[in-house]
Image (spheres, coloured by chain):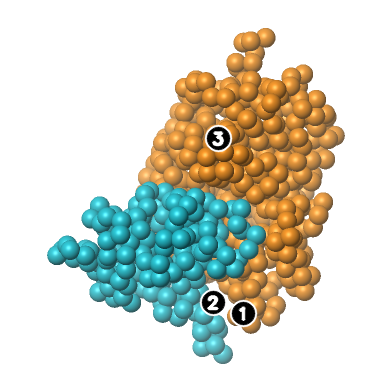
Chain colours: A cyan, B orange
Amino acid sequence: MKFKGRIWKFGDHVDTDAIIPARYLTTSDPQELAAHCMEDADPEFPKKVGKGDIIVAGVNFGCGSSREHAPIAIKAAGVSCVVARSFARIFYRNAFNMGLPIFESPELWDRVAEGQEIEIDGDAGTIRVEGDPSVLRIQPIPPFMQELLDDGGLMAHIKKRLKAKG
Amino acid sequence: MGMTITEKILAAHSGQREVRPGMLINAKIDIALGNDITAPIAISEFRKAGGGKVFDPDRVVLVPDHFTPNKDIDAARQCAQIREFAREQKLRHYYEGGEIGIEHALLPEQGVVVPGDLVIGADSHTCTYGALGAFATGVGSTDLAAAMMTGQSWFKVPESIKVIFRGSLRRWVSGKDLILNLIGRIGVDGALYRALEFTGETVRALGMADRLTIANMVIEAGAKNGIFAPDEITMEYIRGRGEREIRIYRSDSDAAYCDEIEIDAGGIEPQVAFPHLPSNVRGISEVGEIRIDQVLIGSCTNGRIEDLRTAAGILKGRKAAHGLRLIIVPATPLIYRQAMEEGLLRTFLEANAVISPPSCGACLGGHLGVLAEGERAVSTTNRNFVGRMGHTGSEVYLAGPAVAAASAVTGRIAGPEELRRKE
């Protein structure tokens, strides 16, 4: 699993109301949600973000509500993955369950500026920042979460398991 | 070594004698809950996976409480999807129209959740049921879909933090002030991935309403669950409500905790969380002069009859400040009726309050009390993030019902003591 893209930088405790405000939760259509992704943190974000871009954030990304609309909006906006110092637990769970790759890196945030390009190798567990020779290590994805990602999310994983059981 | 109450419930539901923090388990679910925002995605995932019948129609609970009464055509469409699914699956705990209450007030009240349960809900405040001595945690829609299919869910066993509240509470200090004080101390990620276990003589003296308020907001410290060991007060509350088997678990005296936090609850004054984080907490004496435009008393955090009694006690014979919008949201139809029978609704109406139907609408900036740019609200709800209750340029100050009611009278943030001093 490799990702290369331009980064958008956000601070600590980015909450789910900032990622996708509740006023848009009368739909679960990914494209409609993507049109308002991160709107209350940066109103221009839905226009600026491009396919393959990466979100880099501080601690506790995705805190607040359990709304899966948050990772859905991020994924549908074209964002390939999110790297944060830490994630709120429901967001963490939701991201793996619906197949949005996320990585924990305590260091990256301090080493990059908005608009820089980074390269993530999820298998090797490394991040490289454009113009910076050093290699950052990311926390390895726990094996069970990797299994979920490999299977294509929780529902696909369960279907596979039920099938194996016969 | 012994186990904590959280570990015991997770062990019992995963068929193991013992579990330890960090272990990944598959556990049986007693209740799986969804609402009108999260259930539509779960239902669609359930159908896509060829879900057929839910694992148990008595244990899948759907409460369309967020945009009730339907705020617009899209919201109505989401509720229609839920209604269709609930009928097709013959769900026992599905609520419509005048039966709808705010889910986390409704489920304990109706005995749907009982001590010893393992509950997941596609709503972050599902953690509320920890007040009953249940393990309850919020998940997303895909988790709900999987649980509806299989009756199981995966969990990482959390480490536990023991929170000990000591001393007796000052007048006007409630469960809301205790939990706000704790979040102020440890921060909005202070209990990330962990269980918060509440104990101490202060907690043992608290009624269920205050315990439910405390457990409700553990998510605001990032916790996986909050939990209270069941005692006489729990059993008194449960009596006559639940039909299902009650299982009492308590932490062993040699259970392991990753941290212990001891708080002198007797030293706590009414608390206010300033914008835009629930951890941005100050005592009422440190608030200063803050004019407000709206007061909301209600929600899954503070919309119970005890909260309404506190508010009515302060509002009786007084009026909301001129130009201030006071909105009261009884959390369930039963609470609404009780408030009517006890004369609280008359007090609220005489204070020029608007009495809303039970709904989550205003708390999350959906409908029934949205803030304009530049407006400020004191709210007994649980979140004050940017734009939570309306425009991104509005502000939410979180407090308990006593401060909220007093603030409604003065038109600025104030404690009830101040009202008495004036008169």
Q: Earlier in the sequence, mark 1 or mark 3?
A: 1
Q: Residue furthest right?
A: B341
Does dot 2 land on a helix, a strand or a loop? helix
Residue B328: tell me if it is visible: yes
Percent x, y of residue B203: 55, 36
For disc 3, the chain is: B
- Label 2 belongs to which residue? A155
Label drawn at residue B374: 3
Q: Work out whether residue B282 or residue B268 is closer to the camera in this orientation and state it.
A: B282
Q: Work out whether residue B404 or residue A77 is closer to the camera in this orientation and state it.
A: A77
Alpha-carbon span between mark 2 and mark 1: 9 Å
Percent x, y of residue B213: 60, 41
Residue at the location (73% across, 64% down)? Answer: B77
Q: Are the residues under badges 2 and 3 in a single subunit?
A: no
Mark 2 against mark 3, which lies toward the viewer? 3
Amino acid under disc 2: Met
- Label 1 belongs to which residue? B48
